[in-house]
Amino acid sequence: MQQLTEPVPIIRLTALAHGGGCGCKIAPGLLADILRTAPIRLPEALIVGADNNEDAAVYRISEHQAVVATTDFFTPIVDDPRDFGRIAATNAISDIYAMGATPIFALGILGMPVNTLPVDVIRQITDGGMAACAEAGIPVAGGHSIDTVEPIYGLVVIGLVDPAHVKRNNGARVGDRLILGKPLGVGVLGAALKQGHLDADGYAQMLDYTTRLNRPGIDLARLPGVHALTDVTGFGLAGHLLEMCRGARVHARIDWPAIPFIQTAIPHVKAGISTGASARNWAGYGHEVTLPGKIHDWQRQLLTDPQTSGGLLVACDPADEASVLQIFRSHGFHAAATIGTVTEGIPGMTLEGNLEQLHAV
């Protein structure tokens, strides 16, 4: 007599987490309050440290070589365990590229509810992370794991860079062009997935952008006309652009029709789907953003939408604008676009342009 077996239950990773991806970051206003009294005493060799919310720390070890170190981890933004691992690892490695450095190895950070998730699911998460590291050409050389209430995965990543090529987020100059490497909308797609509204095409687009390594950062850093570089992640385009403006004491004017958006995210955000992090972001820095009077709430949501493994944001001399765009496109980042200009003024951001036009890719 054939013995019947019970079907294996489907585990939704996103249901085990209160937030997802970079959307689970502490809100920028609260984070500033937490770190306000933290002492910043930097040894001379630490040429990039905790000031101005940089993407990674940089420690000079010789005239032509510096070590770059970063860490990033978060809760699931997708339900597929291997995809979650790939996205988390790609996002962590991005901080190294954002400094203009080359990654050399990683350490895993793993927190799992071991009594809830089967070992095979946990293994698929780490396999996905190692696959992303293999694509970047680096090994996972160790790590640390704990038993947690929510699933958490990420990496510590170490890289190398010539100190002359280090790109910080505070070097923007008046007249610079602002160029964004990936379209916005990942947070919206993640929220749609969690609510059961994301179709296969939307998921494919989301996975494509969140697992695409920001390798152009290495080539961009070698351009003297690139004055500032960062990646757009949990604080959204507006948040990370404001960090750039505060650090350089400049203002940014952004052209709404020029901003690239993920096409499949638009109907979801228009239907009212967004992340809680988007609202927290606006509450933390909205007073620094000037918006047109007729802007819709869904348009503002896209500006503050947390980007998990988002694109690089570049401030460059106008003479190098074409070179920057060519570097992006040579690496397959065909959605890269010039979105605005750096101007004089109080640090902040002004949104301009025809709000009826939309650049969806």
Image: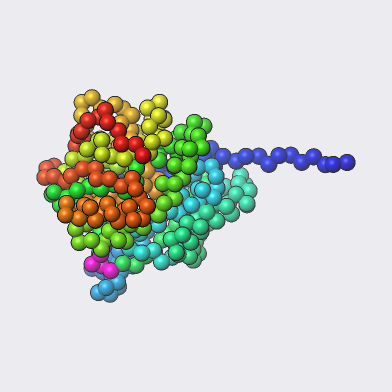
- Residue 181's place in the image compared with 298, above or below, is below
> In this image, 333 relative to 85: left or right?
left
Q: Position of residue 307 (x, y in %)?
A: 37, 43
Q: Position of residue 287 (x, y in %)?
A: 22, 35
Was residue 122 drawn as part of the magenta stretch in this picture?
A: no
User: Which residue is found at the position 27% from the left and 58% from the top?
Assistant: 220
Q: Position of residue 66 (x, y in %)?
A: 30, 69
Closer to the camera in the image, 336 or 193? 336
User: Quarter-wise, where is residue 343 in the image?
Assistant: top left
Q: How is the image coloured?
A: rainbow
The residue shown at (52%, 54%) is 128
Location of the C terminus by quadrant is top left
Q: Main secondary structure of the magenta part?
A: helix
Between residue 35 and residue 138, name the one nearer to us. 138
Q: In percent of the image, x 45 and y 64: which residue is there?
A: 138
Q: Nearer the viewer, residue 260 or 150?
A: 260
Q: Residue at x 25, y 29 (%)?
A: 355
User: Does the stretch in magenta take in 163?
Assistant: yes
Q: Which residues are magenta?
A: 162-166
- The reply to whether residue 281 is visible in this rendering is no
Residue pushed farthest left? 344
Q: Is residue 221 left or right of residue 124?
A: left
- On screen, residue 206 versus residue 316, left or right, reads right
